[in-house]
């Protein structure tokens, strides 16, 4: 989230978009936490990641929040743009 926020703020010089992005991430996480959607399940080789799901950030749908749900705990693994090598990145995150 910080990298994307900084990209909008510093690289593109779009402070309004940066602030809107940060608010959208917070809003989307609160939606997931309040009533976890079915989300799109991801398939990984690691068993720990097999229950991972993702949801687009409201208003920034190309950017996805990847998370794990465990009973009453929401663990945000990463927030990534869909053009990234998501599978490789998340396999490293969940394993670590």
Image (cartoon, rainbow, N blue to C red):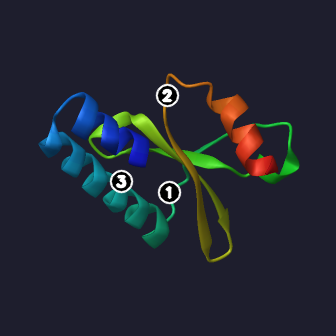
Q: Is residue 23 left or right of residue 66?
A: left
Name above or below for residue 7 compared with residue 75.
above
Q: Residue at x 32, y 34 (%)?
A: 7
Residue 43: quadrant of the picture? top right
Numbered circle sitting on residue 37: 1
Dot 1 alpha-carbon crowd within 10 angstroms: few under 14, some 14 to 19, many 20 or more: few
As measured in the structure, the alpha-carbon distance from the residue carrying label 3 to the one carrying label 2 is: 15 Å
Q: Is residue 45 above or below residue 30?
A: above
Is tag 3's residue or tag 2's residue first in the polypeptide sequence?
3
Q: Are marks 3 and 2 in contact (CB under 8 Å)?
A: no
Cα–Cα span, label 3 and label 1:
15 Å
Residue occupying the far bottom of the picture: 72
Picture coordinates of residue 44, whole percent (x, y):
79, 37
> Vertically, is 35 above or below 77?
below
Residue 94 in the image, given as x and y percentages of width and height: 75, 49
Looking at the image, residue 57 sits to the left or right of residue 66; the answer is left
Residue at 67% over, 35% down: 89
**Left or right, residue 8 beside residue 66:** left
* Local crowd size for mark 3, using a 10 Å CA cut-off: few (<14), some (14–19), many (≥20): many
Between residues 53 and 37, which one lies in front from this camera angle?
Answer: 53
Q: Nearer the viewer, mark 1 or mark 2?
A: 2
Residue under pointer 3: 25
Mark toward the viewer: 3 or 1: 3
- Residue 88 visible (yes or no): yes
Tell me, yes or no, whether the two marked residues, 1 and 2, touch with CB atoms within 8 Å: no
Q: Earlier in the sequence, mark 1 or mark 2?
A: 1
Residue 10, position as x, y percentages in the image = 25, 36
- Earlier residue among tags 3 and 1: 3
State the residue position of label 2: 82
Residue that extends furthest to the left in the rendered view of this protein: 16
């Amino acid at each position: 989230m910080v990298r994307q926020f900084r990209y909008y703020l510093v690289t593109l010089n779009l402070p309004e978009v940066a602030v809107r992005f940060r608010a959208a991430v917070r809003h989307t996480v609160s939606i997931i936490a309040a009533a976890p959607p079915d989300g799109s399940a991801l398939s990984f080789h690691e068993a720990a990641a097999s229950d991972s799901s993702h949801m687009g950030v409201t208003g920034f749908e190309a950017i996805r929040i990847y998370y794990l749900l465990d009973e009453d705990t929401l663990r945000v693994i990463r927030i990534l743009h869909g053009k990234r090598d998501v599978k490789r990145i998340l396999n490293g995150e969940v394993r670590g």
